[in-house]
Image (cartoon, rainbow, N blue to C red):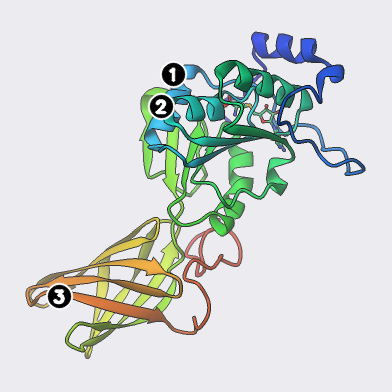
């Protein structure tokens, strides 16, 4: 563990001042229902992300107007408040500490975005955040790793994940902003398996894919030739792959849609459209969750 977030002086003062009597004061605050088990103590103590880093996180995620931004362990609400104020996003802060929920609601009111953000008092590991376009984190390395399978299983391919300070273990970031130690990932579609494709003109091919997070390996079978893929990568629901053909590189790009994939294949013979379906995938979406961890057919530990 490189850094353990600690409660900032201002945050501690605010949390102490707020006290238990103000827990229900925040407008729009949503607490655990009456009779529900009390949430456990925080898995990591509060420390706010510095504002320049908040900006870097939202910038690298390219947050757009109307998008839904979740901050898991939202502290004083600064990330979702900034997302609403600067980018016109809608924000959801998930926070276990009720004093911080109350403080967040006050902060949202002061910032004039109380109608576009909400703060939910809940354990982030139990939260349903499937509707997120962007998820932000400032937790701890082991918490990121614990959250990783839930995010890969539940978030839509293409959802952007940004973490301040900590990475995701062997799920390598798509981008890192070193100046602010901000890591960025895009949730990949799950494409492992054998895809039977037909290119325009009727030529049949098969694509055998193994996947580790956003990278894939495998082969392209064209007629009686089996060509190893020289590179294959997922960017959300988009696959791009290359294979070395007899007369040059074959470039394949595709987009996962429901149980199928469609795209284009480029070779010396020209550029052709193709469609494919995955073997044994009848009725199953190509975004189906892996059994555990990151991939449906794993090539490494998750
Ligand atoms: C390091 S702070 C980050 C605050 C905010 N995200 C930021 O970057 O400014 C982590 C926050 O996570 C909250 N937290 C810890 N465990 C949690 C859990 N299981 N569920 C929800 N929130 C949790 C803590 O109370 C704390 O406010």
Q: In which quarter of the image is residue 47?
A: top right
Q: Quadrant of residue 80?
A: top right
Q: Which residue is drawn at 82% across and 38% down?
A: 39
Say which residue label 2 marks. Answer: 56
- Does residue 184 sit above or below 278 in this rendering? above
Residues tagged 1 and 3 counted as in contact (Cβ below 8 A)? no
- Does residue 251 sit above or below 182 in this rendering? below
Q: Which secondary structure lies at badge 1?
A: helix
Mark toward the viewer: 2 or 3? 2
Measuring from the top left, give residue 250's x and y in whole percent: 17, 71
Residue 52 tag number = 1
Residue 190 tag number = none
Check mark 1 vs ligand 1: CB closer than 8 Å? yes or no.
no
Q: How crowded is mark 3: few (under 14 residues within 10 Å), some or many (20 or more)?
A: some
Q: Which secondary structure lies at badge 2?
A: helix
User: Which of 141 and 188 lies nearest the eye of the viewer?
Assistant: 188
Measuring from the top left, give residue 288's x and y in whole percent: 53, 68
Check mark 2 vs ligand 1: CB closer than 8 Å? yes or no.
no
Q: Distance between the residues labelled 1 and 2?
A: 6 Å
User: Which of 198 and 84 lies nearest the eye of the viewer?
Assistant: 84
Say which residue label 3 marks. Answer: 245
Measuring from the top left, give residue 189's x and y in whole percent: 44, 62
Mark toward the viewer: 1 or 3? 1
Q: Distance between the residues labelled 2 and 3?
A: 42 Å
Residues tagged 1 and 2 counted as in contact (Cβ below 8 A)? yes
Residue most extreme to the right: 35
Q: Residue at x 74, y 39 (%)?
A: 122
């Amino acid at each position: 563990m490189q850094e353990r977030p600690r409660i900032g002086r201002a945050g501690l003062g605010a949390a102490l001042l707020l006290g238990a009597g103000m827990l229900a004061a925040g407008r729009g605050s949503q607490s655990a229902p009456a009779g529900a088990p009390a949430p456990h103590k925080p898995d990591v103590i509060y420390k706010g992300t510095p504002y320049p880093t908040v900006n870097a996180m939202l910038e690298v995620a390219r947050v757009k107007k109307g998008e839904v931004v979740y901050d898991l362990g939202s502290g004083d609400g600064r990330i979702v408040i900034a997302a609403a104020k600067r980018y016109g996003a809608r924000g959801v802060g998930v926070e276990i500490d009720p004093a911080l929920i109350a403080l967040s609601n006050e902060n949202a009111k002061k910032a004039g975005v109380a109608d576009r953000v909400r703060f939910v008092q809940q354990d982030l590991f139990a939260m349903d955040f499937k509707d997120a376009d962007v998820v932000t984190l400032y937790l701890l390395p082991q918490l990121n790793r614990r959250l990783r399978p839930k995010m890969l299983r539940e978030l839509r391919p293409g959802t952007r994940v940004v973490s301040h300070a900590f990475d995701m273990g062997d799920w390598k970031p798509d981008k890192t902003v070193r100046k602010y130690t901000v890591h960025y990932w895009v949730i990949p579609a799950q494409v492992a398996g054998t895809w039977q494709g037909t290119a325009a003109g009727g030529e049949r091919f098969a694509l055998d894919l193994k996947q580790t997070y956003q990278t894939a390996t495998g082969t392209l079978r064209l007629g009686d030739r089996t060509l190893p893929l020289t590179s294959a990568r997922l960017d959300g629901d988009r696959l791009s792959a290359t294979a070395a053909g007899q007369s040059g590189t074959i470039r394949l790009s595709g987009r996962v849609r429901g149980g199928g994939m469609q795209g284009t294949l480029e070779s010396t013979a020209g550029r052709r459209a193709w469609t494919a379906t995955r073997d044994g995938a009848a009725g199953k979406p190509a975004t189906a969750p892996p059994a555990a961890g990151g991939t449906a057919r794993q090539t490494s530990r998750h």
